[in-house]
Amino acid sequence: MHIHTLYNPQFDIEVSFNVRCVLTIGNFDGVHLGHQQVINALKRQAQVLDSHPAVMIFEPQPLEFFAGEFAPMRLMAMRDKVEALFAHGIAVVLVCKFDGRVASLLPFDFMTHVRSHINLTGMTLGHDFRFGEKRQGDIAYLKAYGKREVIDISVLADFQQSSVRVSSSLIRSHLVHYDFEGAQAALGRWFELRGIVQHGQKLARIFGFPTANLGIRRQNPPVRGVFVGKAYLPYNGASLETSAEVFQAVANCGYRPSLDGRQWRVEIHLLDLKVPREMYGQRLAFVPLKLLRAEKRFDSMDDLRDQIQIDVQQAIQFFKDTTL
């Protein structure tokens, strides 16, 4: 069982497996409001037990290991997830490589591996948490284990909005229907696409609409189409509000069928960037606010150029009509 331990630089922590920690375990995909409820409870438990709050995540996520390309789309990459956990006050993140060996561990063996990396004093978990081979480990098992090993076990109920459980699946459903405000309500922030600006084919520049091409790698595309939104550049990984500049933008998210694209990618045109600037190698976050149209194949480059002009004008009008 390979576990990589990451320490939050905001904490003064001695790098050692003897670090006293309270722990929660899960995918934490999106670090949404339900996850934040767990994190806040974990921090309260850490204060009582004179310990540091820690989170264990898996890479790949278990369903990605078992289902491959049929796994649910990710809401965020691992780097973004770790940054979000640190921003919410988590001191230690344990990144566990999920493979067949981990999947076949019995609950006791799993806990033994965890405790070889941190001095475990407590755990805060959702009521439906399961782990170990064939999901044999559950809250009842952990309560008995904690009593025997003197580890405090705290259990939380689901976090709900309007009697609906907040989950990563709920947020994916909002995104599939392009309900970005619904996703925002469950996430506690706007949904973002983040990546490093890379060199592309520069075809849009020929049309007079240069784009920033993001390197984003996901097994399933979270959104597809042409969107109006906001771009944050450079994105520093902490929060959108502390990024250097905010730009109104229009973005194509998809496979570019008119150019026989094979890889899902994000191409962003900054509407209010008057002077060209060097962006390659910088991190950028794009927040989609509204779907303008679906992707489609155009018969000619002239037709594609004309449609891009229409997309840009619709995006400009959107910002004239909205307070977002």
Image: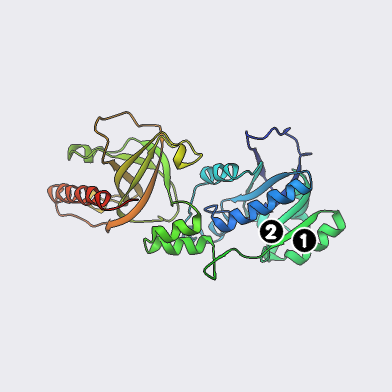
Q: Which residue is rendered at x = 18% and y = 54% of the image?
A: 298
Q: Which mark is residue 221?
A: none
**Amino acid type, mark 2:** Leu
Dot in front, 2 or 1: 2
**Amino acid type, mark 1:** Leu
> x, y (%) of residue 109?
77, 55
Determine if residue 175 is in view: yes
> x, y (%) of residue 321?
25, 53
> x, y (%) of residue 144?
82, 63
Q: Residues within 10 Å of mark 2 (few under 14, many from 20)?
A: many
Q: Which residue is rendered at x = 36% and y = 51% of the image?
A: 288
Q: Is residue 132 left or right of residue 302?
A: right
> x, y (%) of residue 279?
35, 32
Comes first in the chain, label 2 or label 1:
2
- Choose between 154 and 96: the one closer to the eye: 154
Mark 2 residue element: strand
Q: Which mark is residue 142?
A: 1
Q: Are marks 2 and 1 in contact (CB under 8 Å)?
A: yes
Q: Which mark is residue 125?
A: 2
* 267 up-or-down from 172: above or below: above
Q: CA distance from mark 2 to mark 1?
A: 10 Å
Q: Which residue is rendered at x = 54% and y = 71% of the image?
A: 163
Task: Say which quarter of the image contains residue 244.
Answer: top left
